[in-house]
Image (cartoon, grey):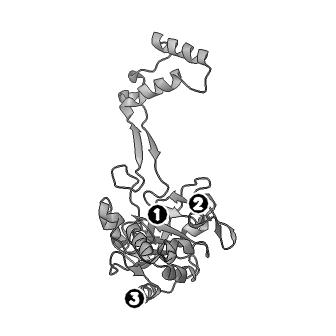
Amino acid sequence: MRPTQRQFIDLTVALDETTPEPFPTKISRIRHGQGVRHLNRAIVYSRKKPLLQNLKHALQYALGTRRFKKDDFPEGEFLSLEKVTASVHAGTHLDAPYHFGSRCEGRPAKTIDQVPLEWCYGSGVVLDLTHKKPGELIVPEDVKSALARVDYSLKPYDIVLIRTGADKLWGTKEYFFQHPAMSREATEWIVGQGVKIIGIDSPGFDRPFGAMIHDYFKTRDPKHLWPAHLFGREKEYCHIERLANLDKIPVPFGFTVACFPIKIAKAGAGWIRPVAIIDG
């Protein structure tokens, strides 16, 4: 019997120091050819060692009795090493209830390391909302119409993926300003169906920062400020921001999504590598 063919679709954008970010990502890179020099530096000096021991090791290094050479490693290369300094909201990431507020449903809100893993693996449904213009709100009627077009009804623990097409601007400054957003009401309706995770292919779940700030200072009405995020104080859910490649999922439902977050203690979000899994 022929084994089932399984397709994996990467739904992420990369954590990359070359792309624009509100809080820039920094990645320092030690290449393979530089590895031996850094390894020698590590064995010669350490802040955790006594001064006399550091001096002894420095002398041994100078005499060549405690020193690695490039020839000690194949092709003269040691191991590469990268050090990343980045916001937990950079790249594709999952926002935990704690990001929305310190309390949710009257209890301490879950941080990213407390999000149940079973929420992060389940049946996926992708909703085509590419007709929504930048700055527009996705309202409950939009979600219901998208579901009706594919003849699907949401069930508890579905992972709902909102496709706006905004990911095509990834890597440009326009990416952060040219996208529609989820309304509080649409978020509430989806969560009301028992959904715990909603994802979107735009940089933020709410409207672009400038649009929210403009409307707030024009009206002084706080309802314009991160309404979909702040709904998460009332009902427990998570959302994914900065998805990509939703247009590559060949079916609107009948596939599986895996979106496990990095376990960062007491953080409000964590990086993820979400994948759509399609069984052939």
Q: Is residue 123 visible?
A: no
Secondary element under disc 2, as helix, strand or loop, is: helix
Q: What residue is shown with label 2?
A: 112
Find numbered disc 3 in the image and state the secondary structure of the residue it sits on: helix
Q: Are marks 3 and 1 in contact (CB under 8 Å)?
A: no
Separation of residues labelled 1 and 2 (CA atoms):
15 Å
Q: Amino acid at mark 1?
A: Pro
Mark 2 or mark 3: whose residue is earlier in sequence: 2
Q: Position of residue 201 (x, y in %)?
A: 40, 69
Quarter of the C terminus within the rendering: bottom left
Q: Amino acid at mark 3?
A: Arg
Residue in view at x 59 percent, y 60 percent: 112
Residue 211 shows up from this direction: yes
Measured as percent of width and height from the top left, residue 244 is found at 38, 66
Label 1 crowd bin: few (<14), some (14–19), many (20+), radius 10 Å:
many
Q: Nearer the viewer, mark 1 or mark 2?
A: 2
Residue of label 1: 274
Along the horizontal axis of the image, is 153 left or right of 218?
Answer: right
Horizontal side of 119 relative to 13 (left or right) equals: right
Marks 2, 3: nearer the viewer: 2
Q: Quadrant of residue 12 in the image?
A: bottom left
Tally of numbered discs: 3
Q: Observer-nearest residue: 240 or 23?
A: 23
In primary-sequence order, the first of circles 3 and 1 is: 3
The single residue placed furthest to the top in the displayed view is: 63
Q: CA distance from mark 3 to mark 1?
A: 25 Å
Circle 2: residue type: Ile
Quadrant of the snapshot with the N terminus: bottom left
If you read the primary sequence from the N terminus, does the residue marked by circle 1 or circle 2 appear first?
2
Question: Which residue does the numbered mark 3 point to in the structure image?
Answer: 149
220 or 101, nearer to the observer: 220
